[in-house]
Amino acid sequence: VNGGGIAGGAAPTPNIDSIAREGVNFAQGYAGHGTRAPSRAALLTGRYPTRFGFEFTPAPAALTKNMRTFNYGIHNGISFPEREKDMIPFAKMGLPQSEITLADLLQRAGYHTLHFGKWHLGESPEFAATKRGFKESLLTSGSMYLPKDDPRVVNSKQDFDPIDRFLWQSMPFYAQKDGGPGFQPKAYLTDYLTDEAVKAIHANRNRPFFAYLAYNAPHTPLQATKADYDALSHIKDHRLRVCAAMIRALDRGVGRVLQQLEEDGLRDNTLVVFVS
């Protein structure tokens, strides 16, 4: 809807596009920051993350060391290893507790608040989504989409990217409900998050709810289902095809969410906002 899409439009996104075509398209929106976690913090607080000291993406020490030794071919990485001893632990790199989130405000206003998917705003218990305004949380931050050797999956590894190499080495395939023990999802991650969001919409159809559905896709590691990959055989580049297949699954998920709102009679009484 904003001009072509991935692979020159070779992977259509009709459900995502429908939100803009049938609603309002904010064609001059701006991310609150240029990297992922601070941008997410801006989205959930309505404030620039530089105002409250969350202007860098939290990263474990092992990843920073990996990136320091990598040569991108443009120039060598610049780092200050002598400062690492002064870094706070990765788990404590969270959204400051002084900040008020959108979920905080909506819960106070009587909404049942639900989080699905990525978080990346602090690993320690005090930074959990259930401590930041969400009544329920299904966490999938730092997860593969399927085990890398699953017969249903098609992988694309980016050996030139130190972040991608770190993820393939260290990421499990897991989810966590309300801070409980980790477990393996029952399906490809994008489809699993959709399944759970659709069930939650139906379960909460008779009361006001706010659902923050933070899909992992199409973030690396690049993993698509074989079915979605096979459906895009006209895309010849393997990496591009895997990424496009991930977006195909994402669009399917958005369509299922919209369909569930329709089936439960909530379509005309619900604001649906899609941001990337």
Image: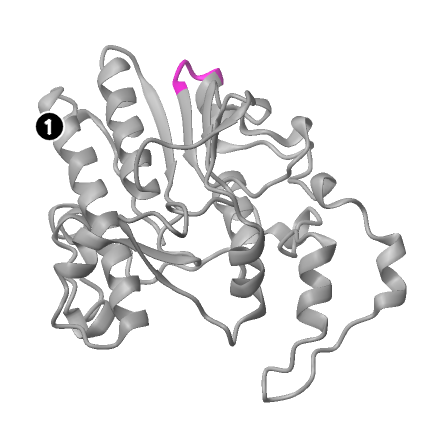
Q: Amino acid at mark 1?
A: Glu
> The N terminus appears in which quarter of the rendering?
bottom left
Question: Residue sitting at 29 percent across and 46 percent down?
Answer: 274
Residue 110 on the magenta segment:
yes
Tell whether 175 sits left or right of 89. left
Report crowding for label 1: few under 14, some 14 to 19, many 20 or more residues within 10 A (C-alpha): few
Q: Which residue is mark 1?
A: 262
Please say whether residue 49 is visible from this viewpoint.
Answer: yes
With respect to residue 111, does 221 lie above or below? below
- Residue 125, position as x, y percentages in the image: 66, 27
Q: Main secondary structure of the magenta part?
A: loop
Tell whether 258 sits left or right of 66. left
| Element at label 1 | helix
What residue span does the magenta drawing correspond to? 108-112
Tell whether 135 sits left or right of 266. right
Foreground of the two, 117 or 228: 228
Question: Residue sitting at 56 percent across and 43 percent down?
Answer: 120
- Residue 66, position as x, y percentages in the image: 68, 66
Quarter of the image where one finds residue 260:
top left
